[in-house]
Structures are given as C-alpha cells and as structure tokens.
C-alpha cells in the first residue's frame, strides 16, 4: 500500500508531511507518495536529522489510498490529522461576558476577582463565584 511520511512540527505542533521537494509541508496533498514501506524507509531515516535538530517529532509512515479524486489517508486517525481538529477551538459565544466580570476589593488583603459565569445569572440558587487571587 502507498505511504507518506508524517510528523508534528515542534514550533507549533502542526501536522507536517515530507513534500515532493523533500521539504516539510502542512498540505496533505503535497506529500511525497512512496510505493511501499521499503521505498519510504530511506526518507524516513533521513527525517531523524530533523528530529535531532529539534524541527519535528514522531516521524512515521502513513498509509494512503490514491483515488481519482486524489489521495486520502487510509485510517480515520490520519484523516483527522490531515483535515485538522474535529472541534472548533474558537468559541462561538464567549464563556464569560465582560460585563459580568466584577472586581471586589477586600479591606486588608489582595484584590479578589470574582467571575460569574453566564449561567449563574439565570438562577440565584446556582451562583458560583470562583475567585482568582492576584497581588
């Protein structure tokens, strides 16, 4: 089965692939395809230099399927790695409303910041105010 070489870039954790030009690429479609594991082994061994230089971590072979529409990962794990996270890292609505963050001053101690969650204002019986102590 055809293979490509995948790793994670240490600078930012992104998934990268050995490209057709021999450089690392973030784009799955630009990965160099090797006919089999034996053909990929020399290139995989060469990636150890980049591991030692602190550029990447965990280089490994990934099985791919070549179709008329292009190449795709053969396993779900690698398909997810190629497509990116399955969750939205940017919250669609803020967890805390800026207007709901209140500052309380204590008489003799450090300032306490009480953060009231959005749901805390729906029911008075459920008020939770986690305190963050700062000096």
Image: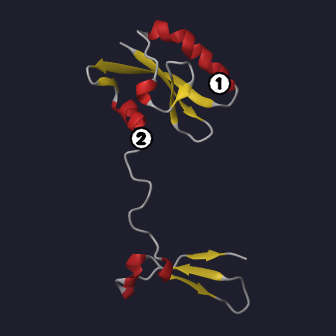
- The residue lying furthest to the top in this view is 38
Which residue: 41% across, 77% down? 118
- The residue lying furthest to the bottom in this view is 107
Q: Residues within 10 Å of mark 1 (few under 14, many from 20)?
A: some
Spatial CA span between label 1 and label 2: 23 Å
- The residue lying furthest to the left in this view is 68
Residue 89 drawn above or below residue 102:
above
Mark carried by residue 111: none
SS at mark 2 in the image: loop
* Cβ atoms at labels 1 and 2 below 8 Å apart: no
Location of the C terminus by quadrant is: bottom right
Which residue: 54% across, 33% down? 8
Which residue: 46% across, 23% down? 31
Mark carried by residue 84: 2
Which picture quadrant has residue 132?
bottom right
Q: Name the side, left or right, on which 75 lies relative to 95.
A: left
Q: Taking the image as drawn, is residue 76 in sight?
A: yes
Q: Taking the image as drawn, is residue 73 in sight?
A: no
Mark carried by residue 50: 1
The percent position of residue 20, horizontal first and vertical second, equals 49, 18
Which residue: 44% across, 12% down? 34
Location of the N terminus by quadrant is: top left
The percent position of residue 58, horizontal first and vertical second, equals 56, 28
SS at mark 1 in the image: helix
Residue 83 drawn above or below residue 21:
below
Q: Earlier in the sequence, mark 1 or mark 2?
A: 1
The percent position of residue 56, horizontal first and vertical second, equals 61, 30
Which picture quadrant has residue 93?
bottom left
Q: How is the image coloured?
A: secondary structure
Residue 43 drawn above or below residue 127:
above
Q: Name the side, left or right, on which 71 lies relative to 134.
A: left
């Amino acid at each position: 089965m055809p293979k490509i070489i995948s790793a994670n870039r240490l600078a930012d954790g992104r998934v990268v692939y050995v490209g057709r030009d021999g450089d690392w690429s973030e784009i799955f479609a630009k990965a160099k395809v090797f006919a089999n594991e034996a053909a990929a082994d020399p290139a995989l061994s060469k990636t150890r230099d980049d591991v030692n230089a602190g550029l990447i971590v965990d280089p490994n072979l990934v099985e791919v399927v070549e179709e008329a529409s292009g190449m795709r990962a053969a396993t779900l794990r690698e398909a997810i790695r190629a497509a990116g996270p399955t969750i939205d890292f940017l919250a669609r609505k803020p967890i805390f409303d800026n207007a709901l963050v209140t500052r309380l001053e204590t008489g003799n101690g450090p300032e306490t910041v009480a953060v009231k969650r959005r749901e805390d204002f729906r029911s008075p019986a459920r008020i939770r105010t986690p305190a963050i102590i700062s000096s």
